[in-house]
Amino acid sequence: MTFGTAESGATNRTLGSKISIRELHSREEEAIMTFLLHLEPEDVRARFGSLRPSIRYLLPGIDRGRHSVAFAATDTGTTVLGILNLECLTTPTAEIAVITRSDHKRRGIGRLLLGCSLLWAERCGLAHLFGYISVQNTAALALVRAAGFRVIRCDGFTLEVGNTLPVSDL
């Protein structure tokens, strides 16, 4: 399933370029390795909870035995600029996580990924999405709040955020 492709005119106004959102496949390890090279240590820690990024948490369905999907934001070529993972834990609940290349933050890529994944989740019948955000990551908190997520709990270090999706008639 493809959302927001360049052909449909999804334009990132800040970059002034076309950004495509597409499903990421487990065979795209080389593109993900290149993506990881463009992450600053602070961004790695915020997404992975440590300074060691793991490709297995970015590619869908690797070694977890649950249904998962990943979306990639790409430029007009094949360069991955951002990734959003959505992992179905129980019906109808899924966990989401998003990361944008450090040199492309605050350009609307995360917002575009999140918006497309919300559409996908609704169409697939998911009712609840949740994720975890460092209390220091105010940009991510603003992003998910703008998308309708609310803070469920906080342990002083990490916020758990959640969103209840509308029931789809599709």
Image (cartoon, grey):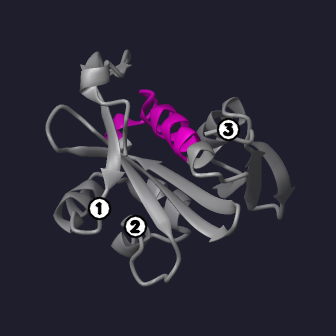
Mark earlier in primary sequence (3, 1): 1
The answer to the question of whether label 2 and label 1 lie on touching residues, with beta carbons closer than 8 A, is yes
Name the amino acid type tagged 1: His
The answer to whether residue 69 is left or right of residue 148 is left
- Residue 145 part of the magenta-drawn span: no
Q: Earlier along the polypeptide chain: callout 3 or callout 2?
A: 2
Looking at the image, do the residues carrying marks 3 and 2 touch, with CB atoms under 8 Å apart? no
Where residue 55 appears, x then y in whole percent?
Answer: 34, 71
- Magenta-highlighted residues: 103-120
Q: Quadrant of residue 153?
A: bottom right
Indicate which disc, 2 or 1, sits on the residue closer to the N terminus. 1
Numbered label attached to residue 25: 1
Disc 2 marks which amino acid?
Answer: Pro
Specify the quadrant of the image occupied by residue 41: bottom left
Queried whether the magenta region covers residue 110, the answer comes back as yes
Q: Which residue is mark 3?
A: 169
> How far is disc 2 from disc 1 in space, using C-alphas?
7 Å
Q: Main secondary structure of the magenta part?
A: helix
Q: Provide residue 112's location: percent of width, then percent of height.
A: 46, 32
- Asked whether disc 3 touches disc 1, contact meaning CB atoms under 8 Å apart, the reply is no
Looking at the image, residue 64 lies above or below residue 156? below
Q: Residue at x 45, y 28 (%)?
A: 108
Secondary structure type for disc 3: loop
**Spatial separation of the CA atoms under disc 3 and disc 2:** 27 Å
Q: Can you say which quadrant of the picture contains the C terminus?
A: top right
- Under tag 2, what secondary structure? loop
Q: Which picture quadrant has residue 52?
A: bottom left
Q: Nearer the viewer, residue 10 or 125?
A: 125
Mark 3, mark 2: which one is toward the viewer? 3
Question: What kind of element bears circle 1?
Answer: loop
Which numbered dot is residue 60? 2
Please report the residue visible at 66 percent of the width from the left and 39 percent of the height from the top.
144
